[in-house]
Amino acid sequence: MRRRLWGALCVMGLWASLHSGTAGAQSPFPSKPVKIIVPATPGGTSDIFARAIANKLQESLGKPVVVEYKPGAATNIGTDWVAKSAPDGHTLLINGITLATNPLLFANLPFNPTRDFAPIIEVAEMLNVVTVHPSVPVNTMRELVQLIKSQPGVFNHGTPGVGSSGFLSAELLAVKTGAKITHISYQGNAQAVVDHLGGILQVGFVNLPVALQHVKTGKLKALAVTSTKRSPLLPDVPTVAEAMGLPDFELVGWFGLLAPSRTPPEVVARLHAETLKALKDPSVIEVIQTAGGSVGGGSSAQFEARIRRDAERLTEVIQLSGASAK
């Protein structure tokens, strides 16, 4: 009798233990819609790439994947929002080189890009085009540099904010040539381009996908690209290095996908695998390449290393330029 009672109690204890473990277990990922936060206004490069990735992730994850916008403060508002989101893989960030540079430019960031994020994957590389409004009487980079230096404080350009690849391109040009252009911050590329098209901004350092259509229609003049090689989409436009005789001039932006830190490694691994698969899909490749980007990839560790490497490399440019967030 005692043996039967003891056996029954053991079975009940085992059942209770298993039941309790199941109840306390984490829900399988994803258990609800996934958000990709774009820390800029709609219509910019990060938006284009986010939507391409979201469409494919929605298919592979089996849950809605939506793109939301939280612009402002040189991408810091949206970035901070994701940093403080639940680390469960359901809230992601797509952002670029500002992750590496904003800690150098903002004295009191409410987040730490290294500590507060789990890098998932690099989505794309993106070069910038140096453009001018047709009213600016120049046709080459050398002419532009000479004009800017002859009229200090007259010429301006706009970007999504201090620390963006466009901002850094202009600062690198200033360091290398002495041609300082006044910078104006916008909440996103879209409005900056509108003002550039209207001549309010005479000069642009614009991501290729945003500038391309306006260059082709003649609404903007393309003088150079900021990469080490010419773009196949603008084969007649030289690099800044070619045009100015500056072999070490290079400023290439990138965009990547990140999750809040403490996101479970298995969730990060799943998101990496599915995004890598998406980046190999012909429709996503077409979107990225048509927009003027180069398709990313690689491991999460490689993406993290790139963020750290660019932070170190661009520290000198920022210090020499005297740039800081106002």
Image: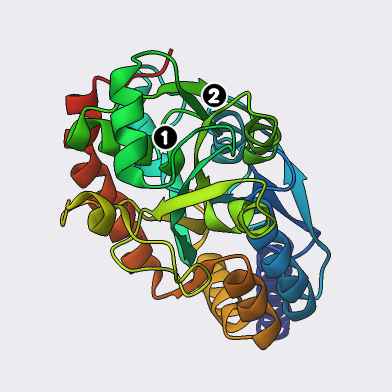
Residue 136 seen in the current view: yes
In this picture, residue 324 sits left or right of residue 318:
right
Quarter of the picture holding the N terminus: bottom right
Question: In the rendered image, which residue does mark 1 sit on?
Answer: 167
Marks 1 and 2: in contact by CB < 8 Å? no
- The mark tally for this picture is 2
Q: Which mark is residue 60?
A: none
Position of residue 6 relative to residue 118, above or below, is below
In this picture, residue 222 sits left or right of residue 194:
left
Question: In the rendered image, which residue does mark 2 sit on?
Answer: 185
Point out the residue furthest to the right here: 64
Indicate the position of residue 72 as horizontal and vertical percent values: 62, 27
Residue 28 seen in the current view: no
In this picture, residue 55 sits left or right of residue 154:
right
N-term-proximal mark, 2 vs 1? 1
Label 1 neighbour load within 10 Å: few <14, some 14-19, many 20+: many
Indicate the position of residue 321 as horizontal and vertical percent values: 23, 25
Residue at coordinates 45% horizontally, 22% vertically from top-left?
155
Q: 164 and 172: which one is in front?
A: 172
Point out the residue furthest to the front here: 137
Q: 287 and 256: which one is in front?
A: 287
Position of residue 185 relative to residue 65, above or below, is above
Residue at coordinates 54% horizontally, 57% vertically from top-left?
208
Position of residue 323 relative to residue 97, above or below, is above
Q: 86 and 4: which one is in front?
A: 86
Quarter of the picture holding the C terminus: top left
